[in-house]
């Protein structure tokens, strides 16, 4: 009987600890927008706003899923000794690791790989990972004399924190918080935690966005809907701090438009590449302040390649070349009209975008057996990564298969014999 009581006690303690680590959404911690905690969007950035209990919450954290990869040469003793430093450089101070994968290329043998997974509750940061059995196993594998190269892939959570207990914060924002987030095509889930002053988690919640583009293979679930923010119901929650209507006298004054729009929409243009009209805050060039709901696209404008050609005349001229990419006039198939975490406003990594229409090129030997397609420095474009665009022009070309130059000349730029 004593053993039975002990088992029940241990079970109750387990439930208590688990609930203390990941409590569900509670009164005093509420997501205001998206109101249903899920939203279908067509741009690569969004905002999450909410309210917190000023008596119990001291810090609000946003946890964002991130993935990064790096090819590290380890063919020499010096490179092997530098491997740990290279991995260290991949970690940020606010990064928690969920999964690490290492693909090893070897001399005269098939490549091998290692993978380790961790729980979010473990809070696996750089210090813990550095002292883990997992990292020692990876390091031992890299030091194998037959290993020439390694591709390290880190998947985890990047944390952003807002110290909402700060007096200056309370004076400016009262009991509200807001986070700007960047989106990858497809499903994006963000976790939010409200922490008490002692560091304990007071509440836990999540928000889901589906960034709909033409490059992701999966589609949004039926319960994901597009809901414009600028409705009367949503705006009423923000009017205590923000003016959300532009008067007729300032609609053509960019500094005023920027001041009003940037507070919530700054993330659209604070990415790696941004579209000039968006970064200049020419918002009213496309968005109608008189629409209902407000700031929808002008109903009488054509948002197609003809609009893009007004600034990108060279892309229109390329349409007369011998080889033209069939989707080259569907600009938004590959480019975001505001900003992107990738070069040239591309909505995702170049190879991901290309393989959405050309899956065979990513799965079969291309252009020859064991030729790398990514994960290496681009030999033709300094500072960039090897990708489909190394050899192919994504718009149009004077050569077959959209090659950037004649086939043998292209090969000889890297393979000089």
Image: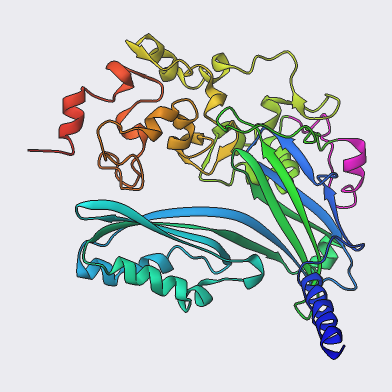
Depth order, front residue of 64/267? 64
Residue 165 part of the magenta segment: no
Q: Is residue 12 among the parts visible in the rendering? A: yes
Which residues are the magenta region? Answer: 231-251
Q: Residue at coordinates 88% horizontally, 42% vertically from top-left?
A: 234
Give the vertical position of 9 relative to 337 (above or below).
Answer: below
Q: Is residue 288 above or below residue 30?
A: above
The residue at 51%/72% (across/down) is: 126
Quarter residue 416 falls in: top left
Residue 360 coordinates in the image, percent (x, y): 40, 28
- Residue extending furthest front? 1
Measured as percent of width and height from the top left, residue 114 is found at: 41, 60
Q: Is residue 245 magenta?
A: yes
Name the quadrant of the N terminus: bottom right
Q: Residue at x 81, y 44 (%)?
A: 34
For this orientation, the residue located farthest to the bottom is: 2
Taking the image as shown, residue 395 lies to the left or right of residue 256, namely left
Any part of residue 84 in sight: no
Q: Position of residue 357 (x, y in %)?
A: 48, 25
Between residue 15 and residue 387, name the one nearer to us.
Answer: 15
Placement of the C terminus among the 4 image quadrants: top left
Look at the magenta stretch and give its main secondary structure.
loop
């Amino acid at each position: 009987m004593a053993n039975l009581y002990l088992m029940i006690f241990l079970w109750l303690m387990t439930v208590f600890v688990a609930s203390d680590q990941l409590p569900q959404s509670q009164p005093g911690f509420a997501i205001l927008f998206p109101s249903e905690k899920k939203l279908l969007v067509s741009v690569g950035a969004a905002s999450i706003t909410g309210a917190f209990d000023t008596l119990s919450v001291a810090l609000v954290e946003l946890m964002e899923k991130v993935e990064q990869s790096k090819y590290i040469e380890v063919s020499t003793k010096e490179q092997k000794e530098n491997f740990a430093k290279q991995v260290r450089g991949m970690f940020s101070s606010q990064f928690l690791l969920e999964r690490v994968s290492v693909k090893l290329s070897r001399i005269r043998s098939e490549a091998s790989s290692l993978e380790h997974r961790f729980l979010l509750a473990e809070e696996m940061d750089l210090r813990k990972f550095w002292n883990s059995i997992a990292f020692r196993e990876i390091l031992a594998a890299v030091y194998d004399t037959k290993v020439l190269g390694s591709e390290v892939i880190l998947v985890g959570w990047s944390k952003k924190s807002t110290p909402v207990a700060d007096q200056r914060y309370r004076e400016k924002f009262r009991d509200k918080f807001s986070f700007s987030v960047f989106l990858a095509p497809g499903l994006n889930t963000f976790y939010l935690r409200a922490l008490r002053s002692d560091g304990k988690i007071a509440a836990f919640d999540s928000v889901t966005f589906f960034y709909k583009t033409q490059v992701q293979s999966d589609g949004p679930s039926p319960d994901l809907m597009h809901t414009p923010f600028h409705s009367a119901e949503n705006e009423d929650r923000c009017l205590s701090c923000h003016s959300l209507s532009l008067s007729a006298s300032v609609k053509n004054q960019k500094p005023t438009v920027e001041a009003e729009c940037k507070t919530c929409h700054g993330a659209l243009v604070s990415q790696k590449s941004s579209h000039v009209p968006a970064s200049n805050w020419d918002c009213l060039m496309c968005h109608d302040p008189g629409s209902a709901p407000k700031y929808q696209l002008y109903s009488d404008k054509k948002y197609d390649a003809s609009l893009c050609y007004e600034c990108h005349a060279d892309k229109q001229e390329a349409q007369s070349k011998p080889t033209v990419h069939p989707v080259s006039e569907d600009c938004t198939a590959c480019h975001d009209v505001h900003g992107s975490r990738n070069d040239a406003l591309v909505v995702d990594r170049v190879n991901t975008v290309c393989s959405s229409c050309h899956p065979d090129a990513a799965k079969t030997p291309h252009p020859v057996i064991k030729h790398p397609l990514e994960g290496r420095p681009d030999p033709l474009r300094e500072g960039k990564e090897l990708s489909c665009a190394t050899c192919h022009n994504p718009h149009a070309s004077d050569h077959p298969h959209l090659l950037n130059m004649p086939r043998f000349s292209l090969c000889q730029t890297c393979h000089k014999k």
